[in-house]
Image (cartoon, rainbow, N blue to C red):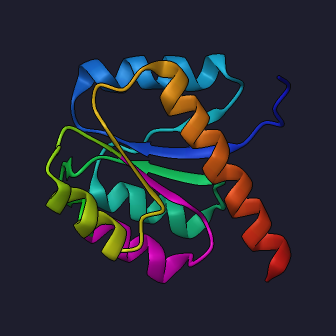
Amino acid sequence: MSRSIADILYLENDVSPHKLVVFWLTEADYNVVVPKTFSDALLVARKRRFDLFLIDNWIDGGSGIELCKEFRKIDPVTPILFYSGAAFEYDREEALAAGADGYLIKPALSEALIEEVSRLIRLGRFRANAA
């Protein structure tokens, strides 16, 4: 299946899944921007448009929930996907209440992650065209 290239901001503080996810996404022809901290992610998101924000619950300099809320203030359209080891239903509900569009629990198979990324990017493009 052919995909158009999309830009993804990905923030993760754990090195192992970070490298693997970046590999999966770049192999699927996505451009991945990887800020190092909460504040770096906000700076980058204010300067440039993305097709998807991909974040963890635990990040350097803040929480994923707070980052999600800040992303929603900056950009109410771009989809936000949590990819996190926080596996309780409460964690998922809290992320969705903060403005996330999806929540995947680590470790997910590469196919599941790419499928959800693709679905949410389509959703974001639909939202942008409808606005």
Quarter occupied by the N terminus:
top right
Quarter occupied by the C terminus:
bottom right
Hey, which quadrant is residue 102 in on the image?
A: bottom left
Left/right of residue 82 with respect to residue 49 in the rendered view: left
| Residue 18 drawn in magenta | no
Q: Residue at x 66, y 40 (%)?
A: 118
Q: Residue at x 29, y 46 (%)?
A: 56
9 shown above or below 48: above
Q: Residue at x 32, y 75 (%)?
A: 97
Q: Residue furthest front?
A: 89
Q: Which residues are magenta?
A: 66-82
Left/right of residue 21 with respect to residue 52 in the rendered view: left
Tally of marks: 0
Q: Where residue 84 appears, x then y in whole percent? A: 26, 41
Hey, which quadrant is residue 128 in on the image?
A: bottom right
| Residue 76 drawn in magenta | yes
Q: Where residue 2 appears, x then y in whole percent? A: 85, 25
Q: Where residue 76 appears, x then y in whole percent? A: 56, 78
Q: Nearer the viewer, residue 121 or 87?
A: 87
18 shown above or below 48: above
Q: Where residue 77 appears, x then y in whole percent? A: 62, 73
